[in-house]
Image (tube, helix red, strand yellow):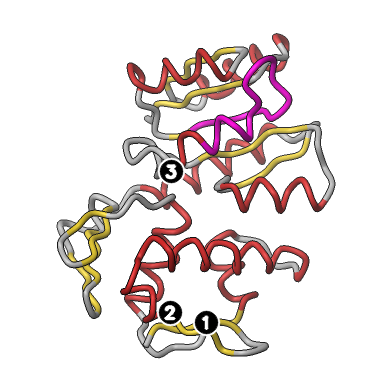
């Protein structure tokens, strides 16, 4: 059972989602605005967030940027549920830090399946295993990453990218391979999302970011 925060201003949809998520065995708290959601984060500390974009007051993308910049909430998986369906909108939200995206109207079965997959990915089954490469150390169990002993503030996707590189040094990953492995997508239009996340990850790693090498016209590797 997981704790899920729902941020959705359509009352009927919020009620439907709440019923189905509860019926699936999870605890869910819902709100119709992102301002209240920020306060709920502190007291509820969810395992996953379902987030609409077009909200009254603070918009969904603004809320997402705020939590991705906070070390306490940065790695909480976020699934966007939105009526916005253009490729540009989807790519933009993925670049901001969304983990997945569903366009309204959507299948409830598909949403619940995505929740299951996201929760499984965010919870490590390993017991206290540490992986290291150069100055980087990754705690797989607690989803923490360190450079020269200092903890990094990474989003869930940034952490997964870093872990993939650290566990497979010198292996070249194409952009499409990274997109499929980390995001579950297989479409060229989203490959710029990979470049955006790699760029941000390098900056957060500081000097250690030099281990992530660009392979022209192909992808990336750790070396």
- Write down the quadrant of residue 51 in the picture: top right
Q: Is residue 87 magenta?
A: no
Categorize mark 2 by other alpha carbons within 10 Å: few (<14), some (14-19), many (20+).
Answer: many
Please report the residue visible at 38 percent of the width from the left and 80 percent of the height from the top.
Answer: 210
Q: Which of the image's four quarters has the C terminus?
A: bottom left
Q: Position of residue 19 (x, y in %)?
A: 58, 15
Disc 1 on helix, strand or loop?
strand
Span highlighted in magenta in the image: 49-65
Q: Is residue 59 magenta?
A: yes
Please report the residue visible at 71 percent of the width from the left and 17 percent of the height from the top.
Answer: 13
Q: Are marks 2 and 1 in contact (CB under 8 Å)?
A: yes
Q: Are marks 3 and 2 in contact (CB under 8 Å)?
A: no
Disc 3 on helix, strand or loop?
helix
Categorize mark 3 by other alpha carbons within 10 Å: few (<14), some (14-19), many (20+).
Answer: some
Farthest residue, direction right: 86
Looking at the image, is mark 3 or mark 2 nearer the viewer?
A: 2
Q: Position of residue 177 (x, y in %)?
A: 59, 76
Disc 2 on helix, strand or loop?
strand
Work out whether mark 3 precedes mark 1 in sequence or the reverse, and give the earlier one. Answer: 3
User: Which dot marks residue 10?
Assistant: none
Q: Which residue bears the numbered disc 3?
A: 119
Q: Which residue bears the numbered disc 1?
A: 220
- Residue 32, above or below 24: above
Work out whether mark 2 precedes mark 1 in sequence or the reverse, and give the earlier one. Answer: 2
User: Which dot marks residue 212?
Assistant: 2
Q: Position of residue 119 (x, y in %)?
A: 43, 43
- Write down the quadrant of residue 2 in the picture: top left
- Mark 3–mark 2 distance (CA, rounded to whole Å): 27 Å
Looking at the image, is mark 3 or mark 1 nearer the viewer?
A: 1
- Mark 3–mark 1 distance (CA, rounded to whole Å): 27 Å
- Residue 49, above or below 137: above
- Residue 23, above or below 196: above
């Amino acid at each position: 059972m997981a704790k899920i925060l729902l941020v959705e201003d359509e009352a009927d949809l919020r009620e439907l989602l709440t019923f189905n998520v509860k019926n699936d065995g999870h605890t869910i708290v819902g709100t119709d605005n992102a301002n209240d959601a920020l306060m709920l984060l502190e007291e509820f500390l969810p395992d996953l967030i379902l987030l609409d974009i077009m909200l009254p007051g603070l918009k969904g993308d603004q809320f997402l940027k705020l939590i991705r910049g906070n070390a306490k909430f940065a790695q909480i998986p976020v699934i966007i549920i939105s009526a916005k369906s253009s490729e540009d909108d989807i790519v933009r939200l993925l670049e901001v830090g969304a983990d997945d995206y569903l366009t309204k109207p959507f299948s409830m079965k598909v949403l619940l399946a995505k929740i299951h997959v996201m929760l499984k990915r965010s919870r490590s089954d390993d017991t206290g295993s540490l992986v290291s490469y150069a100055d980087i150390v990754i705690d797989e169990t607690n989803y923490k990453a360190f450079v020269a002993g200092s903890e990094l503030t990474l989003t869930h996707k940034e952490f997964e990218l870093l872990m993939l590189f650290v566990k497979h040094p010198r292996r070249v990953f194409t952009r499409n391979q990274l997109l499929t492995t980390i995001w579950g997508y297989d479409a060229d239009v989203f490959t710029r999302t990979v470049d955006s996340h790699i760029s941000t990850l390098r900056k957060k790693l500081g000097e250690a970011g030099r281990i992530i090498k660009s392979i022209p016209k192909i992808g990336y590797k750790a070396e």
